[in-house]
Amino acid sequence: MAHASWLYRKERTWTSTIHSILTIVVVCVGVCETKQGNRAREGLHMAQDRSKWVVKTCLGLLLLAASLAVSMSVLASPQIDVSLGFSGHFVPERMAPLRVSLSGLESSFSGSVRIAEQVGNAWRGQARSSVCFHINGASRIYEDTIPIYGFSQPLLVSLLDEEGRVIAQQEVPLRDKWLKEPFIVAAGEFPAPVTPDAVQIDETDLPTKWLSYAGVRSLWIGRTTNGLTAEQEEAIYRWTSAGGITVVFTGSDFFRLDSPLVRDMIPLTNPHLAEGVHLVGDLRPGEEVLLHGSTGEPLLVSRQLGAGVVLLVTADAFSLTEAEQAQLRDLVPSATQVDLSDATASMLQQMPVTRPGYPTAIAIVAVLLTALVVIISRVRSDLVRVVSLFTVIVACSLWSGLYANRTKQVHDVYTIKTAVSVQQRLGYSIVSSGLTYIAGRIDSALPKVRVNDWMLQALPRDLNEGSYDIELLCNHVALVSLSPGDIRILRGGSDNTPLISMSFSGDERVVINNGLSLSLPSAAIMLDGTTFLLRPISTGVHAYSLSREAEAFAPTSRELSSLYAAVNKDYDLSSGIWLVAGTITDSTVDSESYRQKVRDVRLILVEGER
Amino acid sequence: MEKRFSLVDAQVMKPLFGLVLFCGLALVLSIPPGQQVKDFGSLAFLQRHGMYFYIYVFFSGLLGLSLGTLAASQQEAGRALYVHLLARIALGQALLVPYFIFVRTLYPGREGMLVLVVLYATLAAFLMSVTSRLIEESGHGTSSRGFLGKYAAFVIYFAAPLLVIPVLSPLGFVSYLLSGERVWMILLGYGIPLGLTFTGIVLCERYLGRAR
C-alpha cells in the first residue's frame, strides 16, 4: 500500500509515538512488577498479590509484544538514504555522483527515484531540474551521475512506486559542501594530507560512472585495501582518457591495484618492484619522467592517455618524503575535460535555415498584381476577363506549389548534435547538443524538446528570460523547455563504444570493420603523425590502402573540420596509430508540437595497435 | 439605374488590388529572414506571430466594406445582392490561393487552421459587405455619413471587442485559432459573425425591400 509523501510521514510519526508510549508503559509495568515481587518475597499479602502479579505480567508481555510489532512495522517501511558527490563535495553546474541506498522494500518492488532541484532565486530567476532513474527489486544500492546546477536549495530525492506515488523522501542539503572550483580527490590511505585541499575518500566510495568525475581536478589513488573494482577502473580509465588527471601511487602497493586495465593505463610495461620499494619497468614510447628520487630512480612518470594524463608515482604514498610530496603537488596539472560546447554553439549559429526564398514570393505577388491590372484594364469581354484571371490564378498556384514544397518548409526547432566517440582499450563518447526554437508553428504552447541523451544544460546568469526547466527521464531522454528565440547548449557523455575497429594487414593496408549503420565519408589514418587519407568507409569489413598521404586530416565539411579542430588540441594524435573518421547526417523530427531539424555531426577516433 | 452585373470590372479592381497587394506584402514579410540560425533577428516574430493571417482577415473585411458600397451604388438587393457579393468575395479569396499554397511552407502541419481562417475571413467579408450595403443604402454609396458609418462599424467590429472579449473580434478570433484554442471557443468565434450576418440579411430584406 502506498501513500502520498506527507501522509506517509504522518503515519510514521504516529507509529513512532505509539511505539514510545508502549515502551514507557512496558517499563512502568516492569518497575511495578519488581516492587510487587519484592513485597511478595517479604511475605506480605501473598495470596492477593500473586494473582495481581500474574495479571500484570501478562499485561506487560502483551504490551511488549505490541511494541515489538509496531517496531517491526517501522523497520519494514521503505527508507531512502542518499549520498551526493565525493564525501558530499561537488561543483555546481557539473555532473556529480549520487548513491541511493534503499531499505524496507519488498523484493518485487519496482519504481523509480526522482531527484528534483530548484535552481536560482527570486533575483536570478528560477528553473527546475528533474532527474529520474529506474529501481527494480534486484539491487538496493543505486549509483548514477546527475547534473547539479546550484547549491542554495536542497535536492529533493523521492522514491516513487510504479504509479508514480511518493513512498519515501529525503532532502539533501547542498549548502555545506559545494566547491567553486574542481577539487583534488584522494582515494585510499595517505600518510597525512598529501594536499591540504584534497577531499579524502575511501576507495570503495569511488564512483563507477566516468561522468561522475566531472568536478574532479585530479584523482590521487593511494593505498587501497582490496584494490578497485572493475567498474571503478573502467570509469577512471574513461574519465582520464576524456581529459582527466590520475595520479597512481604504486611501489609496494601496486599489486593491490594490479589488473590488465591498470597495466594498460600506467606508463610502464612489465612493471615489477625493485628493492621492494620502487616500481620499475620499461617506459612506453613518448612517456616522460617528471621527477627523480634521491637515488636517481624515476619517481614520477607521466603518460598521455587520450586527452588526459596518467601520473605514476613509483613509490607508495607512505615512502615519500615531505619534499618529494611538495614537488609532486607542483607537478600535477589540472584536468581539462574535452568539452564540445563551444564548437556546438558555433555550429548551431551557422546551421543553414530551410525556408522559402524572397524572390519567388515577390515574383508571385508581382505577377498577380500585374495580371489583375492588365486584365481588368485591357480586356473588354467579361467572360475573357474571368477566364484570363482564373488562368493566372491557376498558373500562380502551380508555381507556388511546385516551388514551396516540403524542402522549403520552415522548421520550428533547430538542433545540432555533436559527438566524439573514442575507442581505445575502452570506448566512450563525449556529446553535446545545441537547440534553438525559431518557431514556425504558432501555438502558444512552448514545446518540450526531446534530446536523446542525459545531459547538463549550460545556464546563464539571468534565468528570468525564457524557461530553463529540464527533465531527465527514466529512459535516459532529456526534455528541454524552449521559448521562441531561446538557445540551449547541453553537454554530457556516455559509455557508448563506437562499433568500429581496425587492424593492419601489411605495411600499406588496413582492414576496417565498420559496424555502424552508416558509412563514414571523411576518414584518415594517422601513423605516427603522418596522415593517410582513406576513401569513404562503408559499412562492413573492407580493406583500405594507405597510399594517399596528406599534410593533415581536413574534412570538406565545415562542421566536421571545426569538431576535429576542437578535439585535435586535446588528443595527441601525432603518436601511435589513429583512425579518424567523421560523418554528418541531417534529419527531420515531426512531433505533435514542433518540427525539428536535426544535424548530427560525429567524429570517431580509434586507436590502433601495430 | 441598375447596372448589368460584372464579376470583374474596374470598380472591383481597387478593393481586390488592395487585398492582393497587402496580403502579398504580409506574405513576403512572414518569410523568416536570414540564411543561418544566427541571422534570425527581429523580423522573425512577424512569422512567429502569424502576421499574414491578421493582415488577411483585416483586408478581407475591408474588401467586404468596399463590395457593399459598390452594391449600394448599383442598388443591388434581394437574392442577387448576396450572390453578387459572395461571387466577388470568392474571387478575392481565389486570387489569394497562390499565397495560401506558399504560406503552407511557413506553417507546416497547420493546413486545418488555414482552412478555418479562410472560411472565417470569407464570412467576415460577407458580414462587412452586408453591413456596408445597409449603411450606404440612403446615400447610394456616395454620402459622407455612409462612409463614416461603415468605417465606424468596421472599427467597432474589428477593434472594440479586443479590449473586452477578444474572440468577438475577427483579429482576436484569429489569434485564438492560431493558438489552437478549444472547440467551443472556435464555435463561438464562428457563431458571432454567422449570427450578425443572419441579422444583416434579415435587415436587408426588411429595409432594402421596403425602399425598393
Image (cartoon, coloured by chain):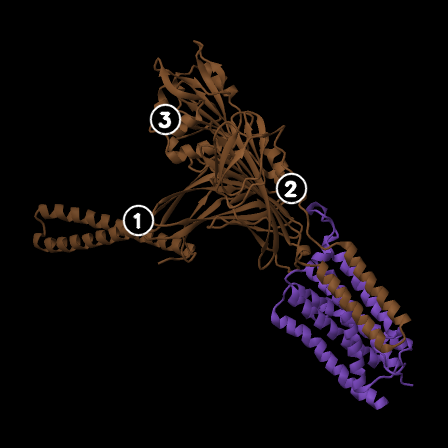
In the rendered image of this protein, does residue A482 appear above or below residue A372?
Answer: above
Q: Nearer the viewer, mark 2 or mark 1?
A: 2
In the rendered image of this protein, does residue A158 appear above or below residue A99?
Answer: below
With A327 as the anchor, is A58 left or right in this view? left
Residue A257: name its quadrant. Answer: top left
Chain letter corresponding to the colour brown: A
Q: Are marks 3 and 1 in contact (CB under 8 Å)?
A: no
Name the residue beneath numbered marker 3.
A258
Q: Evaluate whether residue B169 shows in this view.
A: yes
Residue type beneath disc 1: Leu
Name the residue beneath numbered marker 1.
A75
Color used for chain B? purple
- Looking at the image, tell me whether mark 2 or mark 1 is earlier in sequence order: 1
Dot 3 falls on a residue whose secondary structure is loop
Name the residue beneath numbered marker 2.
A347
Residue shown at 88% from the left, 71% from the top: A376
Residue type beneath disc 2: Met
Spot the residue most to the top. A295
Label 2: how many residues lie within 10 Å, few (<14), some (14-19) or many (20+)? many
